[in-house]
Amino acid sequence: MPKVLVVGSSVGGSIAADTLRDLGIETILLERDLNYVKPCGGAVPPRAFSDWNIPHDLIDRKVTIAVVHSPRHHSEFPVRSSHPNPETDFIAMVRRERFDRYLRERAMSKGAELIEGKLEHVDFGPRGIKAIYEDKRNKTHVIEADAVIGADGAYSTVAKALGLVRLPMAVAYQERIRLPERAMAYWEQRAALYLGDDVSPDLYAWVFPKCDHVAAGIGAGAGKTKAARQLLANLKHKLRDQLGEGLSVKFEAHHLPMHPRKHLSYDRAALVGDAAGLVQQTSGEGIYWAMKSGEMAARAIAKHLDAPTAANLRRDYDAPWWRAYRSTYLFLRFLQRISYNSDLQREIFAAMCDDPDVQRLTFDSYLNKQIVPVPWLVQLRITKHWLETALREWQQLRREGVAYKAA
Ligand SMILES: Cc1cc2nc3c(=O)[nH]c(=O)nc-3n(C[C@H](O)[C@H](O)[C@H](O)COP(=O)(O)OP(=O)(O)OC[C@H]3O[C@@H](n4cnc5c(N)ncnc54)[C@H](O)[C@@H]3O)c2cc1C
């Protein structure tokens, strides 16, 4: 019977295993550490819950108000799409310890065999793969399978065994801070983004609400990672009035790949999620993309188990993936280049968040996971607003610069 090994039982790996089992494929799920909790803000689009039939009781909070702070602006606006619907117009906040466990256990309930062990290496042969892993007692074992799905995250051992280089990485630091009920009330339905050199020179900082705590974190791109602890301290200083009585309960840090790999598939192997570099560079959003790529890779492998060659898998996984999502990746990368890198860009970005057209466009795309076509009249309106805002912000920063020099 054909067998597929999935390495990593987080969001990408569990959805891959779940899909393989739905297709009747014998599946082994190899996880380094069953107690591991992926450091993560846990913001998930509601689409993930409907796409994979996930119960809403895994959602800690439904965020319906987004707040964006730049050094000079404060913008607060509803999470609302072009066709307002309270059932779907929110950002789900989950705790990865619950969310990932649910997905893993569901894959197991469908018959995926779970093994706790750390993948050390994969040998690829003409008739199959041999995966060498170490169990918790440092004993070495071998799994033979027809193909492997690498869902083993940013430091993927499967990618290394395929001879691939490390992707460019950013680092994300996050602290979970438990707040008294009174202080949590402010975060009941709110999530905040902070822009600025002092909290995140090239990405953004965030505060995401969970059941009884908030997750406050910062992203730092290549070359800025040494400053990450200080950036997080600066964010907490900014939030001192809201977090004053809070108790720090967990500190987490992890790398995020900042570029997709050239290929997602290889002979007898497919990479998904962070292992494939499928995080959105602008937002650091990777959960939905890991799940979707896990599903698509599993379907392609199941279809070609008699000949899981790079060419076959690229035709049925890489090609449809990029057909569906290339424009999303390109647009969001462009948005990052024009939004986060200087105070002028950040002020324009925050000011544009007050524009109802921009709000609708943002949430239509985020909630549906597609760049929605924009009518030309709306494009014209946004462009005019952007030019006016850019000119106003440039003049303001110039005036402030002149005043600062004079002082
Ligand atoms: C601080 C931070 C905040 C984030 N916030 C958000 C957010 O709010 N929303 C969002 O969408 N995304 C967010 N992301 C990104 C998101 O966490 C990732 O994109 C997502 O978890 C990727 O899922 P994955 O299944 O590809 O890999 P991962 O979640 O990284 O899981 C990899 C799995 O593989 C296992 N593994 C690794 N190596 C081996 C091995 N050798 N053998 C066996 N098992 C192995 C690991 O133990 C782990 O279980 C954030 C990331 C960080 C770091």
Image: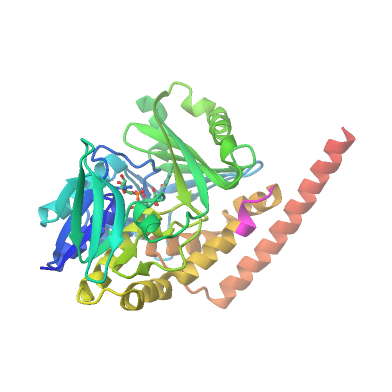
Q: Which residue is farthest top?
A: 245
Picture coordinates of residue 353, whole percent (x, y): 57, 54
Relative to 119, is 165 on the left or the right?
Answer: right
Picture coordinates of residue 277, whole percent (x, y): 44, 58
Quarter holding the C terminus is top right
The residue at the point 42 percent across, 40 percent down is 208
Choose top left, top right, bottom left or bottom right for residue 180: top left
Instruction: Tell me if I can see residue 87 in this picture.
Output: no
Q: Which residue is farthest right?
A: 406
Relative to 5, is 383 on the left or the right?
Answer: right
Choose top left, top right, bottom left or bottom right for residue 87: bottom left
The residue at the point 66 percent across, 62 percent down is 386
Say if 247 sits above or below 120 in the image: above
Instruction: Tell me if I can see residue 296 in this picture.
Output: yes
Q: Nearer the viewer, residue 352 or 123?
A: 123
Relative to 24, is 287 on the left or the right?
Answer: right
Picture coordinates of residue 49, whole percent (x, y): 27, 56
Relative to 132, is 86 on the left or the right?
Answer: right
> Is 225 covered by the magenta stretch?
no
Picture coordinates of residue 89, whole percent (x, y): 37, 56
Range shown magenta: 337-342
The residue at the point 76 percent across, 53 percent down is 394
Say if 140 sits above or below 183 in the image: below
